[in-house]
Image (cartoon, helix red, strand yellow):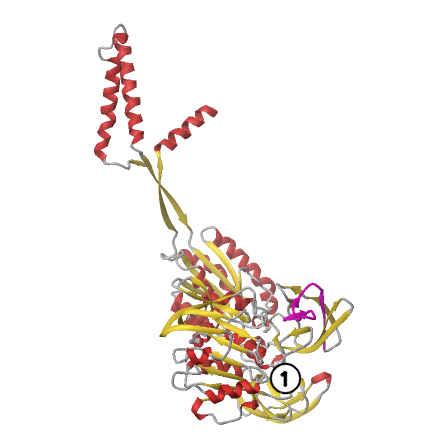
């Protein structure tokens, strides 16, 4: 503790000087104190001198400087693999009972010296130590990504990862772990012994096919220690509980490590959701027959709708085309404007990228689009002819300074109701990169324009539309007032390792524009397929006779599995529609019937969907201890086995780089506050 003042140090001389002057004024040659005894007079003079000097010192705003030290223990993270492959071997009882007790003992010992944080991982990362081993997928890279983001700049001493090293989601953990600057210790779980096993490793297929067409399945087979044995590969149509064998092929395992790719051609004979079972007959001596089977679901569609994209080569077009072609029922065809000589009436939607342009006004194409009432998407960019665009009666007119552009980020509006976007999308919009939008002196917006995104320019949210829809004319249209959509797709992959967010926007935009208007008052929006380990979610919309969205009545749904078991649900209300999260269901085919009563009218909707089983954890069950060794070795750690857990505390304690960190916090407080506090204590006492 020390003192300092907020003024020059020489002013401290004023304190005793003021004390001397004040004391002298009272006691030096003062007739009132002339008869006072000398000892008392000097004592009073001294007290008055000290008091006045101290008061003047307080006027100089003296501060008390104090330092407080805080000791932060080193953080030790313990992450447990909770995937199903851990208990796929013979020692499952050990991992469910003995192993958790051993960890409890080690964690209690470590907690005395370290700040222990526990986690478990599989498909996702959780802040708890779980030993249920129910996760269907393993993503070790997401564990390291999460640790890097959450503990950046912290006193992270060590990361302890207990896993069998098998990962089937994300990317190589060795690369993900390089961002972690602390030590990594690994606990090698699972069994590395190779057993007899025949595996249907993978079935590559398209999610949809078209009625009457032939579609392929690519079946990947693997086998271990089955040389000289034989089996039979069958493909069966199990739709509706039937067992119709469509493909049979004998398989002879010709080597100890066997691999074979088998092409299968099937014919879509009827429309609807089809369930196919691909199976290898078990071989004598196999210990794991769960991975001998794969179930796939394919949606057979009556017809495919075609979408025309007119554009000069541009990365936005490539991104949009890929998303459209991954959507059931749609196929995109791309042409350079001068090279297109086809008939427009075969297309359900036309996308014009920076057309009409400065060099090509595509007058004939625009006239045909208007005559045929074809929905259209205008993407505006640096090559767009804004004068020609403004003549299209789209509901938006832009006045711009030449070819100047501004970076415009997307911000969602609150009143968009043409279709529903997921919460994941809404929460992610603010992280999308900026598009290059025309730098406009004015954006003249028609009342009929339904705006999805406004432009956010330099942290200011404007009223300029970035993406908007108009359905007031003879055909629906969409305007994207900026180029650079491909950056949204790249950012989505960078953050999520997939394109789900970008694909959701393109898919729902295309479906809204291209699909013929549904004039029904009650509508259900449900995907055809879900993964077994993800929740079943769907949306519902209810309209009054004026086709205005309402959500006062209660919407109920009954979901029925292939065995006839029924599950009842009630939709939750959103701002103007409905949403249902039915949670996770078992793999298989399901039908549903939704109902809502409006006055005396009862509306119902029926449909079907499937849950694809996730069997990645049971496909390959041989532990990868080499990966666990590499993780530890590259981060100055050590690989241990479950029976060596008690060695961990000694290994960590022996390290010189896992030590507490002392943080010093210096604070300043006025001295007068201390004196007031002391006075209050005296009064209280």
Q: Residues within 10 Å of mark 1 (few under 14, many from 20)?
A: many
Magenta span includes 556: yes
Identify the residue position indicated by label 1 in the image: 299
- Is 439 in front, or is 224? 439
Task: Report the predominant secondary structure element of the magenta stretch.
Answer: strand
Q: Quadrant of the N terminus?
A: top left
The reply, left or right, for residue 549 in relation to residue 385 is right
Residue that appears at 58% across and 79% down: 511
Q: Nearer the viewer, residue 519 or 569?
A: 519
Residue at image position (62%, 78%) is: 529
The answer to which image quadrant residue 131 occupies is bottom right
Q: Quadrant of residue 486?
A: bottom left
333 or 449, nearer to the observer: 449
Q: Secondary structure at mark 1?
A: strand
Against 504, residue 573 (above or below) is above
Which image quadrant for residue 47? top left
Which range is magenta? Answer: 536-561
Callout count: 1
- Specify whether residue 336 is in view: no
- Observer-nearest of 179 and 637: 179
- Is 275 one of the magenta-colored residues? no
User: Residue 331: percent from the left, percent from the top?
Assistant: 54, 86
Who's the residue at 39% across and 63% down the image? 458
* Residue at 38% across, 65% down: 636
Instruction: Provide residue 471's location: percent of width, then percent of height.
Output: 57, 76
Find residue 375 and report its horizontal and vertical position in percent. Answer: 55, 82
Image coords of residue 439 (percent x, y) = 39, 71
Residue 20 in view (yes/no): yes
Instruction: List the single residue furthest toward the right.
Output: 600
Reply above or below: 169 against 215: above
Residue sitting at the far top:
35
Position of residue 566 in the picture relative to residue 330 (left or right): right
């Amino acid at each position: 503790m020390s003192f300092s003042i907020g003024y020059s140090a020489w002013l401290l001389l004023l304190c005793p000087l003021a004390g001397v002057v004040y004391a002298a004024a009272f006691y030096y040659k003062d007739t009132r104190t002339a008869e006072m005894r000398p000892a008392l007079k000097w004592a009073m003079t001294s007290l008055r001198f000290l008091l006045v000097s101290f008061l003047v010192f307080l006027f100089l705003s003296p501060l008390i400087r104090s330092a407080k030290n805080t000791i932060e223990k080193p953080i030790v993270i313990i992450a447990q693999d909770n995937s199903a492959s851990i208990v796929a071997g013979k020692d499952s009882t050990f991992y469910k009972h003995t192993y958790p007790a051993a960890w409890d003992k080690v964690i209690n010992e470590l907690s005395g010296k370290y700040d222990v944080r526990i986690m478990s991982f599989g498909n996702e990362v959780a802040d708890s130590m779980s030993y249920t081993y129910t996760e269907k997928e393993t993503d070790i890279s997401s564990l390291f990504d999460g640790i890097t983001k959450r503990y950046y700049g912290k006193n992270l001493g060590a990361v302890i990862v207990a896993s069998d090293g098998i990962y089937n989601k994300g990317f190589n953990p060795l690369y993900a772990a390089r961002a972690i600057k602390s030590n990594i210790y690994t606990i090698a779980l699972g069994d590395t012994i190779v057993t007899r096993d025949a595996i249907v490793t993978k079935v590559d297929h398209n999610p949809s096919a078209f009625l009457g067409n032939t579609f392929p399945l690519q079946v990947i087979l693997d086998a271990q220690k089955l040389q000289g044995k034989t089996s039979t590969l069958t493909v069966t149509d199990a739709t509706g509980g039937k067992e119709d064998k469509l493909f049979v092929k004998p398989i002879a395992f010709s080597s100890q490590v066997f691999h074979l790719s088998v092409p299968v051609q099937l014919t879509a004979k009827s429309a609807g959701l089809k369930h196919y079972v691909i199976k290898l007959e078990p071989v004598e001596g196999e210990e794991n027959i769960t991975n001998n089977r794969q179930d796939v679901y394919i949606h057979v569609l009556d017809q495919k709708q075609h979408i025309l994209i007119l554009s000069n080569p541009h990365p936005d077009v490539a991104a949009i085309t890929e998303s459209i072609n991954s959507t059931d029922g749609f196929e995109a065809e791309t042409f350079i404007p001068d090279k297109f000589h086809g008939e427009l009436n075969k297309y359900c939607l036309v996308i014009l990228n920076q057309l009409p342009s400065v060099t090509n006004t595509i007058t004939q194409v625009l006239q045909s689009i208007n005559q045929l009432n074809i929905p259209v998407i205008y993407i505006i960019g640096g090559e767009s002819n804004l004068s020609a665009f403004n003549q299209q009666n789209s509901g938006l007119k832009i006045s711009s300074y030449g070819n100047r552009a501004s970076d415009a980020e997307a911000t969602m509006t609150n009143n968009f109701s043409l279709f529903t976007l997921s919460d994941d999308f809404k929460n992610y919009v603010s992280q999308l990169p900026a598009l290059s939008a025309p730098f406009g002196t004015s954006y003249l917006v028609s009342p009929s324009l339904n705006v999805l995104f406004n432009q956010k320019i330099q942290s200011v949210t404007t009223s300029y539309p970035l993406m908007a829809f108009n359905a007031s004319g003879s055909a629906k249209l969409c305007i994207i007032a900026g180029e650079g959509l491909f950056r949204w797709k790249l950012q989505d992959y960078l953050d999520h390792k997939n394109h789900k967010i970008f694909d959701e926007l393109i898919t729902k935009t295309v479906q809204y524009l291209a699909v013929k208007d549904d004039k029904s008052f009650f509508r259900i929006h449900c995907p055809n397929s879900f993964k077994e380990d993800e929740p079943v979610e769907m949306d519902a919309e209810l309209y009054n006779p004026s086709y205005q969205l309402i959500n006062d009545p209660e919407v109920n749904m009954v979901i029925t599995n292939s065995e006839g078991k029924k599950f009842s649900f009630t939709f939750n209300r959103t701002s103007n529609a409905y949403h249902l999260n039915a949670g996770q269901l078992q793999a298989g085919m399901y039908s549903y019937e939704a109902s809502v009563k409006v006055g005396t009218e009862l509306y119902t909707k029926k449909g079907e969907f499937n849950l694809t089983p996730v069997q990645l954890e049971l496909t390959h069950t041989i532990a990868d201890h080499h990966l666990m060794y590499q993780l530890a070795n590259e981060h100055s750690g050590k690989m241990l086995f479950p029976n060596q857990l008690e060695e961990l505390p000694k290994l960590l304690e022996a390290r010189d780089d896992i030590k507490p960190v002392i943080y010093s916090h210096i604070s300043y407080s006025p001295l007068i506050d201390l004196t007031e506090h002391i006075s209050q204590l005296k009064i209280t006492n």
